[in-house]
Image (tube, helix red, strand yellow):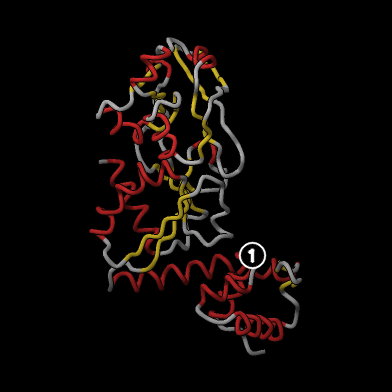
């Protein structure tokens, strides 16, 4: 029997991982039709069907799952060894694709780009900033960014930065007109600016002090879909607005916004970079994870 090549077995693993000939072919730099022919050749050589194919999906047969279960560790070791050998003689290069929510992307991730790229100038970092949850494996991202409560249990997580805080702010004019609330429930009688995410969700505002947690759903004349629009509406005196302190700080320092209820808004844990496996990491991702660990320690 003519044995399948290492490249074709790696392609089989990629098709299984992506659930798609097209995505696996893109990663391998070949056409989808070529990928299909190569997998068919593997099946012919092995003498058994390895993939179930429909017009909508691709999945492993029982024989295919058994084969990859034995082959996957060896393939990962071989690929890691080849990558390590290549990296030993050249600088890290390639594209690092990251999916991150806007506050983490703008306030935490963006400031890390300059020092990281100064160290690895041949890496290209592509960031997609969106509020909704993404399947980073299915959508072709190397890593994602989320806050701790949103992390899947099967992901590896690395701290991206330090604690963050929410603030509730309003314009000096609005506070002069309606007064400053002294406790969170007072916001229920005041105009507020709310945020509706792309999923359609409007999260309640949560406050905490000395072990007491209060959750309210304020009302108001404006609903926004992004932080910058909310800040403009707040500076224009349209309502009290809950947002990340990092976004509001320039306007607070300029006197255009005033924070209220600070003693009800303690810091919370900052975001994490997450990815699906410690093994077979792309070189740019491995370099970025190492950079993060060094930066957070410092």
Image quadrant in which the C terminus is located: top left
From where the camera sits, is residue 269 visible? no
Residue 170 drawn above or below residue 109: above
Question: In the picture provided, is 189 more to the left or to the right than 267?
Answer: right
* Spot occupied by residue 166 in the image (x, y as percentages of width and height): 41, 28
Which residue in the rendered view is the most extreme toward the bottom? 2
Residue 206 drawn above or below residue 102: above
* Spot occupied by residue 281 in the image (x, y as percentages of width and height): 45, 61
**Residue 20, picture quadrant:** bottom right
**What residue lies at 47% left-to-right and 59% top-to-bottom?**
142
Kind of element beneath mark 1: helix
Image quadrant in which the N terminus is located: bottom right
From where the camera sits, is residue 70 visible? yes
Which residue in the rendered view is the most extreme toward the top? 182
Residue 119 drawn above or below residue 227: below
Question: In the picture provided, is 149 more to the left or to the right than 168?
Answer: right
194 or 83, which is in the foreground?
194
199 or 230, which is in the foreground?
230
**What residue lies at 67% left-to-right and 70% top-to-bottom?**
67
* Spot occupied by residue 272 in the image (x, y as percentages of width and height): 43, 43
Q: In the rendered image, which residue does mark 1 sit on? A: 69
Binning the other alpha carbons within 10 Å of mark 1 as few (below 14), some (14 to 19) or many (20 upward) gives few
58 or 231, which is in the foreground?
231
Count of numbered circles in the view: 1
Question: In the picture provided, is 248 more to the left or to the right than 31?
Answer: left
* Spot occupied by residue 240 in the image (x, y as percentages of width and height): 44, 23
**What residue lies at 39% left-to-right and 65% top-to-bottom?**
95
**What residue lies at 50% left-to-right and 55% top-to-bottom?**
277
Residue 250 drawn above or below residue 174: below
């Amino acid at each position: 029997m003519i044995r399948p090549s290492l490249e074709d077995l790696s392609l089989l693993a990629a098709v299984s991982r992506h659930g798609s000939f097209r995505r696996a072919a893109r990663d391998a730099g070949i056409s989808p039709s070529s990928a299909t022919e190569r997998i068919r050749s593997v099946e012919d050589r092995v003498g058994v069907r390895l993939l179930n194919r429909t017009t909508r999906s691709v999945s492993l047969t029982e024989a295919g799952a058994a084969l990859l279960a034995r082959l996957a560790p060896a393939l990962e070791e071989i690929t890691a060894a080849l990558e390590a050998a290549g990296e030993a003689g050249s600088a890290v290069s390639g594209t690092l694709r990251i999916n991150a929510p806007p506050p983490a992307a703008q306030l935490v991730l963006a400031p890390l780009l300059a020092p990281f790229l100064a160290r690895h100038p041949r890496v290209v970092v592509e960031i997609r900033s969106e509020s909704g949850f993404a399947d980073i494996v299915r959508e072709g991202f190397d890593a994602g960014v989320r806050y701790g409560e949103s992390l899947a249990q099967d992901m590896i997580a690395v701290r991206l930065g330090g604690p963050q805080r929410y603030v509730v702010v309003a314009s000096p004019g609005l506070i002069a007109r309606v007064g400053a609330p002294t406790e969170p429930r007072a916001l229920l009688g005041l105009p507020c600016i709310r945020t509706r995410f792309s999923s359609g969700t409007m999260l309640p505002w949560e406050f905490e002090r000395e072990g007491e947690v209060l959750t309210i759903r304020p009302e108001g004349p404006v609903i926004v879909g992004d932080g910058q629009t909310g800040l403009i509406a707040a500076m224009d005196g349209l309502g009290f607005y809950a947002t990340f302190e990092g976004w509001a700080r320039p306007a607070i320092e300029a006197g255009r916004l005033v924070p209220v209820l600070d003693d009800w808004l303690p810091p919370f844990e900052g975001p994490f970079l997450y990815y699906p496996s410690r093994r077979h990491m792309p070189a740019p991702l491995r370099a970025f994870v190492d950079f993060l660990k060094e930066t957070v320690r410092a």
